[in-house]
């Protein structure tokens, strides 16, 4: 699968840390905080499909890709 941004997979474009949250607010808050501190959005907080998966994706200012998610 190609990375979300469509660029080729590489050491800095295919590794992601995923953090399981306890609710939607624990997905929304870190995403907003990261953006306020220079991160870039790679997928805003929201539902993904119809499976009860709620997630947000971002790159930190130093290039780390993070995901926060919750399964309903």
Image (cartoon, rainbow, N blue to C red):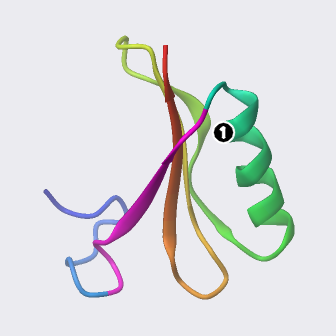
Give the residue displayed 62% in from the left and 28% down from the top. 22
Task: Residue 20: say if magenta.
Answer: yes
In the figure, is residue 49 to the left or right of 24? left
Q: How dense is the environment of label 1, judged by Cα within 10 Å: few (below 14), some, or many (20 and up)?
A: many
Which percent across, then down, holds residue 67?
50, 52
Q: Nearer the viewer, residue 4 or 21?
A: 21
Give the quarter of the image for residue 62: bottom right
In the figure, is residue 17 to the left or right of 28? left
In the figure, is residue 54 to the left or right of 11? right
Farthest right residue?
Answer: 36
Q: Nearer the viewer, residue 50 or 19?
A: 19
Give the quarter of the image for residue 25: top right
Which percent across, then down, holds residue 23?
66, 24
Vertical order, 11 against 38 (above or below): below
Give the residue displayed 37% in from the left and 20% down from the top. 49
Q: Which residues are drawn in magenta? A: 12-21
In the figure, is residue 8 to the left or right of 23? left
Which percent across, then down, holds residue 66?
51, 62
SS at mark 1? helix
Give the residue displayed 65% in from the left and 68% down from the top. 40
Vertical order, 38 against 53 (above or below): below
Mark 1 lies on residue: 27
Task: Residue 70: say if magenta.
Answer: no
- Could you tell me which quadrant the N terminus lies in? bottom left
Vertical order, 44 against 66 (above or below): above
Give the residue displayed 63% in from the left and 75% down from the top. 60
């Amino acid at each position: 699968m190609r990375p979300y941004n469509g660029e080729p997979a590489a050491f800095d474009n295919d590794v992601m840390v995923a953090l399981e949250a306890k609710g939607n607010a624990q997905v929304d808050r870190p995403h907003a905080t990261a953006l306020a501190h220079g991160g870039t959005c790679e997928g805003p907080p929201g539902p993904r499909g119809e499976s009860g998966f709620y997630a947000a994706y971002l790159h930190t200012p130093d290039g780390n890709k993070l995901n926060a998610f919750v399964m309903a």
